[in-house]
Amino acid sequence: MSAEIIIAEWPKNSRETLRVRLDTFKDQAIVDCRAWYEGSDGTMKPGRGGLTVSIRHLPSLARALAKAVETANATGLTPSDGPQTD
C-alpha cells in the first residue's frame, strides 16, 4: 500500500474527528484508529492517543468490536437516540 486509505471518520466533538484508516509504518501495513484535529496550518493532524496495530490483528479487532456492540446493545449501554455514523 503506497498511501493511506481512510475507512471512516466522524465528529468526536467540535474540535476533533475520529478516523479509522489503513496505512503503512516502517513498510508494515497497519490499521490506525485515533482522533485528529485541525492544525494551525489548516491540515488535519493525528492526536497522540489512539490505537495502531499490525493489519494482521484486524480480523481479531473486528470480532472484538462486534462483540462490544452486541454487549453494549444487550446491556442497554447503547443510546437509542444518539448520533448514528452508518
Image: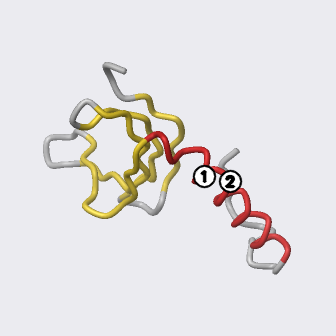
Which residue is located at x 52 percent, y 35 percent? 7
Q: Report the front residue among 32 and 45.
A: 32
Q: Report the front residue among 86 and 23.
A: 23
Label 1 with label 2: CB-CB less than 8 Å: yes
Q: How is the image coloured?
A: secondary structure
Q: Total label count?
A: 2
- Horizontal side of 72 relative to 50 (left or right) equals right
- Crowd tier of the residue under label 1, counting other residues whose Cα lies within 10 Å: few below 14, some 14–19, many 20 or above: few
Q: Quadrant of the C terminus?
A: top right
Which residue is located at x 49 percent, y 41 percent? 56
Q: Position of residue 33 (x, y in %)?
A: 43, 51
Secondary structure found at label 1? helix
Secondary structure found at label 2? helix
Q: Position of residue 44 (x, y in %)?
A: 28, 42
**Rendered position, 49 above or below 5:** below
Q: Residue furthest top?
A: 2
The residue that label 1 is drawn on is 60
**Rendered position, 10 above or below 8:** below
Q: Quadrant of the N terminus?
A: top left
Q: Residue furthest front?
A: 56
Residue 74 found in image quarter: bottom right
Which residue is located at x 70 percent, y 54 percent? 84
**Rendered position, 81 above or below 59:** below
- Crowd tier of the residue under label 2, counting other residues whose Cα lies within 10 Å: few below 14, some 14–19, many 20 or above: few
The residue that label 2 is drawn on is 63
Which residue is located at x 65 percent, y 49 percent? 85
Q: Residue furthest right?
A: 74
Residue type, label 1: Ser
Q: What's the distance in space between the residues labelled 1 and 2, CA to CA?
A: 5 Å
Q: Position of residue 13 (x, y in %)?
A: 45, 63
